[in-house]
Image: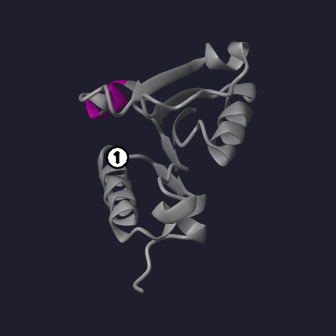
Amino acid sequence: MKIFITGATGFLGLHIANVAINEGHTVMCLRRRTSISLFDKIVEDKIEWLNNSVDSDWKQNLYVFAPEVLIHCAWDGVRGSSRDDANVQLKNVEFSKELFEAYPYKQIISLGSQAEYGLYDS
């Protein structure tokens, strides 16, 4: 199965990508240019990476990859003052919508910090 994962340099995404690769799935991960990979080299070499801050054509590359599943674990501003910054959280929601609409996935799984914190009205 082809799986597209966001947030693979974070806690949940890292473990999900490791399991997916160990089970023989083909994995593409979206990351920021500044993200640091914590994968073992043997796993790192099996991941196809998209850098959303560099690859302006990441959506085209997503279509070429043709994932069946999106596992969305990315969420900015989960620590410190960004956690309560409505602008940061709104950008997360907008990016999530963009991801969900970017490709006709068979399944979308969204989990992680957006579920715990999310955007709220103060």
Going by the image, does 108 lie left or right of 58?
A: right
Q: Quadrant of residue 32?
A: top left
Residue at the (70%, 14%) spot, across then down: 41
Going by the image, does 93 lie left or right of 82?
A: left
How was the colour assigned to the protein in this rendering? one colour
Residue at the extreme front:
81
What is the total number of numbered labels drawn onto the structure image? 1
Residue at the (60%, 58%) spot, across then down: 112
Going by the image, does 89 lie left or right of 28?
A: left
Relative depth, front residue between 102 and 83: 83
Secondary structure, magenta segment, majority class: helix
Residue at the (30%, 52%) spot, across then down: 98
Q: Quadrant of residue 122?
A: bottom left
Query: Picture coordinates of residue 93 (x, y %)?
Result: 37, 62
Residue at the (42%, 28%) spot, across then down: 33
Q: State which region is magenta.
A: 59-64
Query: Picture coordinates of residue 91 (x, y %)?
Result: 33, 58
Query: Picture coordinates of residue 83 (x, y %)?
Result: 50, 65
- Image vertical order of residue 93 relative to residue 52, above or below: below
Type of amino acid at the residue the image marks with label 1? Pro
Query: Picture coordinates of residue 35 (x, y %)?
Result: 51, 32
Q: Is residue 53 magenta?
A: no
Going by the image, does 79 lie left or right of 60?
A: right
- Image vertical order of residue 45 relative to residue 83, above or below: above
**Dot 1: element:** loop
Task: Pick the quarter of the image with the N terminus.
Answer: top right
Relative depth, front residue between 66 and 46: 46
Residue that label 1 marks: 104
Relative depth, front residue between 68 and 16: 16
